[in-house]
Amino acid sequence: MTKRTAGAGLTIAIVLALAATVRADEVWTGRVKQNSGATDYTVVMRLSDDGGETEYPELKCGGKLTRVAQSGAYSFYLEKITSGGTGCIDGAITLVFSRDTMTWGWVGAYKGETYVAWSSLTRK
């Protein structure tokens, strides 16, 4: 094995280890900050093999997640709000896994306004 091949093998092993840190049916939670509108609210996210669900208790709404892509430690989901409040909108979520925490980023638009939200999630 050459150094180049050994490095590629190590990179693949690291990516697989990072991806393996999140198992189906895990619950993640954190406090959300947002650029505009509601802020400092809770997100509860339940992941499954092909998607998952979100719940925003203070906003009284939640949604369904559809996983659309994964690349290394990054996973990408579309969120469709399926329950509750009128203040919640559909969006796209990017998750970045790192051991026992997850960086959660969300973006959506409503009436020409862009909304961005972020959090650091932990396993519940």
Image (cartoon, grey):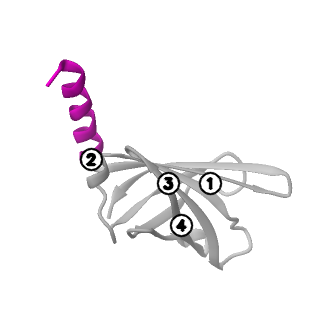
Q: Mark 1 or 4 closer to N-term?
A: 1
Tell me where residue 120 appears, x and y as whole percent.
43, 48
Q: Is residue 44 left or right of residue 26?
A: right
Q: CA distance from mark 2 to mark 4?
A: 21 Å
Q: Quadrant of the C terminus?
A: bottom left
Q: Residues within 10 Å of mark 4 (few under 14, many from 20)?
A: many
Q: Amino acid at mark 2?
A: Leu
**Callout 3 touching callout 2 (CB < 8 Å):** no
Residue at point 59% right, 61% down?
Answer: 78
Residue annotated with mark 3? 69
Q: Which residue is mark 4?
A: 66
| In this picture, residue 31 sits left or right of residue 107 | left
Residue furthest to the top in view is: 3
Q: Secondary structure at mark 3?
A: strand
Is residue 8 depicted above or below 118 in this figure? above
Residue drawn 27% across the image and 47% down it: 16
Find numbered disc 1 in the image and state the secondary structure of the residue it sits on.
loop
Identified by mark 4, the residue type is: Thr
Dots 1 and 3: beta carbons under 8 Å?
Answer: no
Question: Which stretch did the figure color magenta?
Answer: 1-17
Residue 38 lies in quadrant? bottom right
* Residue pointed to by mark 2: 16
Given residues 119 and 7, the one toward you in this image is: 7
- Mark 1 and mark 4 residues within 8 Å of each other at the beta carbon: no
Q: Position of residue 91 (x, y in %)?
A: 65, 59
The residue pinned by badge 1 equals: 39
